[in-house]
Image (cartoon, grey):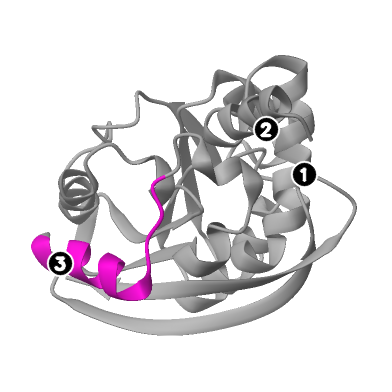
Amino acid sequence: MEKDELKILAQNLANPQGEKGIEIGEMMNATNISMTLESIKTLLIEDDEHILEIGHGNAAHLKNILSRAQNLKYTGVDISETMYNEARKLNKKFEGQADFVLYEGKKLPFEDKAFDKIFTVNTVYFWENPVEFLNEIYRVLKKEGTFVLTFGQREFMEKLPFTEYDFTLYSNSEMEEIVSESQFKRMKISEKEEDIPSKSGNETIHRVYTVLTIKK
């Protein structure tokens, strides 16, 4: 890929826009699905819970979430108007159980202690003020709630040609340090590995990622 193409890819990974954004959203769902499903599994979803996903993309995985327990409610929040529209279109049949919210990426537009479980996959690279945003997540999470933060490790992400454009990368220790600076105090780390198709070409790459289970 040329430099300009890599920049456009990076921009659309951060905030998918238009037709290209829809295409990137489909690709993200396909390449990130194992990370997403691992995150959902780690939440240990139970009956009657309200789940928040930060950065829902096209939310083609919503059916999996809602099938895990009875009487669930799901809210997805995203900065991309393209993904907001696409997620609503793809999940029309779940509109009684699920809603999607467009926001500016800094303040979560919800009341305190609104959610039982919160998760996010591959969004932390784009948080402007990670500690402040973690405190926002803390604010909207219920007292005994669980937050799952999933991200590709720095050493792996640095090998991807598009991450030099406006991605902030983290090792496990760097991420632990940031979480410890927030109001969250308890966390458990789980490392995963898998082979996936590359976003910037046809080759297969070996991905190493982290699932952080964080508690109030």
Instruction: Give the side of residue 92 with respect to residue 23, left or right.
Output: left
Q: Quadrant of residue 147?
A: bottom left
Element type at marker 1? Answer: loop
Q: For the residue labelled by badge 2, is the local secondary structure a helix, a strand or a loop? A: helix
From this view, report whether residue 126 is shown above or below residue 15: below
Boundaries of the magenta span: 168-181
- Determine crowd level at label 1: few under 14, some 14-19, many 20+ residues with C-alpha closer than 10 A: some
Q: Percent x, y for residue 154?
A: 46, 64
Majority SS type along the magenta span: helix
Marked residue nearer the N-terminal end (3 or 1): 3
Q: Position of residue 83 (x, y in %)?
A: 62, 29
Which label's residue is closer to the chain start, 3 or 2?
2
Q: Amino acid at mark 3?
A: Phe
* Mark 1 or 2, nearer chain start: 2
Cα separation between marks 3 and 1: 35 Å
Q: Is residue 97 visible?
A: no
The residue depicted at 16 percent of the width and 70 percent of the height is: 216
Q: Which residue is mark 1?
A: 200
Q: Based on the displayed image, in which of its 4 quarters is residue 43 positioned?
A: bottom left
Callout 3 touching callout 1 (CB < 8 Å): no
**Side (left or right) of 171 relative to 179:** right
**Which kind of residue does numbered mark 1 sit on?**
Ser
Between circles 3 and 2, the one closer to the viewer is: 2
Mark 2 residue type = Leu
Q: Nearer the observer, disc 3 or disc 1?
A: 1
Q: Are marks 1 and 2 in contact (CB under 8 Å)?
A: yes
- Asked whether 78 or 189 is in front, the reply is 189
Taking the spot 63% from the left edge, 19% from the top edge, the residue there is: 17
Does dot 3 land on a helix, a strand or a loop? loop
Question: Which residue bears the numbered disc 3?
Answer: 184
In the rendered image, the quadrant that contains the N terminus is top right
